[in-house]
Image: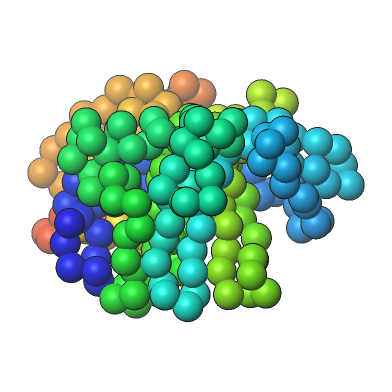
Amino acid sequence: MNTPNEFSGPFLKFGATVAAAAIQQQDLFNTTLGPGDRWADLEQRTLTGADGVLDGVSLLGSFSHVTQTWLWGWANPSFEQTDRAIAPTLRIRDFGTQYGIGEFTTGEPELWGFPAPHQAATTLAIAAGVVLGGHGTWSTAINEGKGAVYLHVDDSRLPTATFDPIATPRLLAAAVSAFPQDHRRVVRGYLKHFKIPYAESPDTLSGKAPDGSTITATFDQYGRLDRTTVEP
C-alpha cells in the first residue's frame, strides 16, 4: 500500500481501465433509481423504494467521516462472511489478491490523507462494483450523518449501459479526470469494454464502434487526452 494520500499503482491501473464504462453504468443506475428514499434489508438482499423492490443487494462497505476510513463489508465485525449480503463481496478480496490491489484486500483502508476522503470512498466502491459485475452502487448516510454505507445492486431487471456515441467524449473526459495517471489506458479500457477494435499511433487512438461510427481520441505531447470525436 502507498501512503494514505493516494491509491496504489495496481488500483490506479485497474481504475483507469474500467473508469469510463463504470461512470456510464453508475449514471444510468442513478437515473433509473431517481432521488426517492429507499430502505435496505441485508438479510433479504433487497432495496425497497416507492417504485418497488430491487434484489441482489450486497454490502460493499462503509465510510466514516469521523476516522475517514473505509471498512469493507467482509471485514465488518458486525457481520459474518457467510452472511447473504456479505458472501458475494469476497470476490473483491480475491480479485485484489490475484492482481495485487491492496485496497481490495485491506479490511479498513485509511483515506484521511486524500484531498476528498469521501470521494475516495465512492471511487473504491464503484470500482469494486465492477468486479461484481452488477448494475450500480447505492449509498446513503448512516449514524446521524457521521458515515455512509455503500450497497451493490445486481438486479437483472435494471438496465445495462450500451455504447453511446454522444456520451463518449464526456465519459472519457470524466474518467481521465478521476484517473489522470494514464489517459491512454482509460481510452483503451473503454473501447475494450464495448469490444471495439482500435489502432494506435503516437498521438491518436481510434476505433470503429458497433453502430459504425468512428471514435478518435487525440493526445498531446505529454500523453494527455486532448480531444475525443465520434463521427458517423
Q: Is residue 16 above or below residue 6?
A: above
Q: Is residue 132 above or below residue 38?
A: above
Please name the residue shown 29% across and 51% down the image.
106
Query: Residue 41 occupies which quadrant of the picture?
Result: top right
Query: Residue 68 occupies which quadrant of the picture?
Result: bottom left
Residue 214 appears at what percent x and percent y?
39, 32
Q: Residue furthest right?
A: 50
Q: Is residue 64 above or below residue 162?
A: below
Query: Residue 84 occupies which quadrant of the picture?
Result: top right
Label count reads 0
Please name the residue shown 72% across and 46% down the image.
40
Q: Is residue 224 left or right of residue 150?
A: left
Residue 70 appears at what percent x and percent y?
41, 60
**Quadrant location, the N terminus:** bottom left
Which residue is nearer to you in this view: 51 or 16? 51
- Is there any visible trace of residue 228 in the rendered image? no
Q: Is residue 135 left or right of residue 53?
A: left
Please name the residue shown 65% across and 60% down the image.
140
Residue 199 appears at what percent x and percent y?
21, 29
Please name the residue shown 45% across and 66% down the image.
119
Q: Is residue 140 left or right of residue 150?
A: right
Q: Is the image coloured rainbow, by chain, by secondary structure, or in one colour?
A: rainbow
Residue 54 appears at what percent x and percent y?
74, 35
Which residue is nearer to you in this view: 2 or 172? 2
- Is there any visible trace of residue 113 in the rendered image? yes
